[in-house]
Structures are given as C-alpha cells and as structure tokens.
Image (cartoon, grey):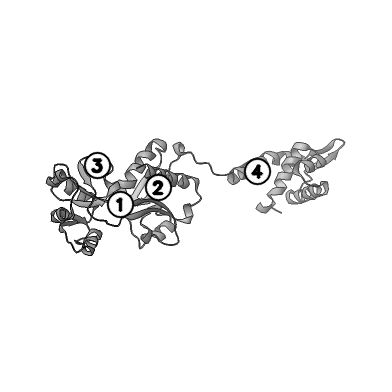
Amino acid sequence: MPIRLPDLGLLQAFDVLMQERSVTRAAARLALTQPTVSGMLARLREAFGDPLFVRTPRGIAPTPRAESLAEPVRRILADVDRLLAPAVFEPAAAGFTLSLAATDYALRAVVQPFISALRPLAPGIRVAVRPIDEATLAQRMEHGELDLALLTPHGAPPDLHSRRLFDERYVCAMRRGHPAAAQGALSLEAFCALDHGVVSLQGGGFVGATDEALARLGRQRRVVVSVPSFLMLLELIHTSDLVALLPQRLLARDAGLHVTEPPLQVPGFTKILAWHARTHDDPGHRWLRELLVEVCRGV
C-alpha cells in the first residue's frame, strides 16, 4: 500500500525513529503519546511490508529495509520543507520579465525613472512595455500576459488591485526664447492669443479640458495642432512657437522649456498602479510595485 501525500507525518515519524532508536524518545520529540507513535509505526510497517524496527534491550534497531529508506525519506522531508518555506526574493539574483502597460505620458513620467532605478538593483529583470488597451486589460492580466498597468481610476477594471501613485496637474510650457516667455505670468488674454497644441488620444480632436475650462469663462483659445502623443507634442514645442498645457511630471527632466502657471484652473488627473490577484502575493512583484511607488514619490 503506497503512502499518500497526506501521510507525510508518517515519514516524519520514521525519520525521528531512525534518529532516536526509541519509541518513547521519538514520542517526546514529536510531542505525541507513545501509543500514537506505536500506531504510526504499525502503519509504516503495513505500508512498506517490512518490520522496519525490531526491539532490542536498548530500544529499537532498524532493519536493512529501514536503513535503505532513511536517506530517501530525509530528502523527501527536506524537499517538502523547501516547498513550504516562505519565498525569498533577492533582486540582484532575479531573472524574469515584467510586463507593464502604459500610455506615452506614463512612459516618460513613470516608466523611464522606474527603469533607471531598477537596473542597478535588479539587472536580470527585463521590462516589456505594452500599450494600454482597457477593453482587454483584465483578461491579459488574468492570462499572465500583463503584470502591471499605469492607469487613471476611471480606466481601471473593478476586479483589479490598485494603488494611487500621484495626482497630476497641468502647467503651461513653451520653448525657451519664445516671445511670450519674456512676459512673465501670462494673462488670460495673452494665453488665448497664442498658438496652442493639444493631445487627442483618439486623433484629430481640437478640444480638451482646457477648452472646457475656458468656455466656462466665456473665452476661447486658438488650437492649431492636434497630435495623438504627448511626446510628439513636446517635440513640437521645442521646435516651434506652439504652447501647450502639459502634465507637470512630463517636464520634470526637460530643461529646454519655459514653464509657467496657466492663467486659469484646469482639472488634473490621478495616476494609479493596477495589478491582478495572480501576482498580488508574489514577493518579486511586491518588491517591484514598492520600487515603482517609491520612484513616483521621488519625482
């Protein structure tokens, strides 16, 4: 009769009997009664078809069959201990791929500084950045195709874990040397008279949150360029007289632009980190999430 996995306690009893050579001492070490250990020995004998131990004046002595089982049983118990031991994550020794979904804004504002912080600590971890697709996000995470996503709260599926990273605000940016840069703080009238660029993620739109805020004041600006990418708009601002309201963190490491406060209040947005329950308790993924949160705090 084979020993089933739920009977690992019998193997532990066998191992202690081999070491103690006494049912009484084995019972004390296992914190069991002597009759209980005797019963376990009877089950072991039945399972292996051998007496395993015989009585002697000084206790019990193993049979040849028991001696042949001693080392394999010790290996099995050691393997089980390793399986049940808490997982230990060592960043410097880790070697796996982290899949991260992000917009082009998050690439510059979050992913770039995150990778810069990650590389010295965990050089064996690869990062695969993928575009955001809200329609398939939860499914891709469930299937292991995606580990993390940088989202706004309204774009996060309700069954994912999430954590707030930061609240973003908009500032007015233009190239250094732009004629309006010498004016200092922009008046609302001067702001509306400038040529503006906007980001339209769907493409082709010329109206955004700034225009809605202006409309509430009875004003209108001149939007002359619409692009689908924050990074593209940044390049246009560097090389033309366009101005734009851009997220402040997008400009954190850009010394080539003149940045000023806009002359009106424009609502910002919140950035969150989302992940699936599949990786919630994994020590490596927990470490990566904490590092990303720490990086966002420091930007």
For disc 1, the marked residue is 169
For disc 2, the marked residue is 98
Task: Pick whichever, 294 or 21, lies toward us.
Answer: 294
For disc 3, the marked residue is 254
Is label 1 or label 4 in front?
Answer: 1
Is label 2 or label 3 in front?
Answer: 3
Kind of element beneath mark 2? strand
Q: Are marks 2 and 3 in contact (CB under 8 Å)?
A: no
Q: Are marks 1 and 4 in contact (CB under 8 Å)?
A: no
Q: Quadrant of the N terminus?
A: bottom right
Asked if residue 255 shows in the view, the reply is: yes
Q: Position of residue 185 (x, y in %)?
A: 20, 47
**Is residue 296 rendered to the left or right of residue 89?**
left
For disc 4, the marked residue is 77
Task: Give the residue type that dot 2 points to.
Answer: Leu
Task: Give the residue type that dot 3 points to.
Answer: Asp
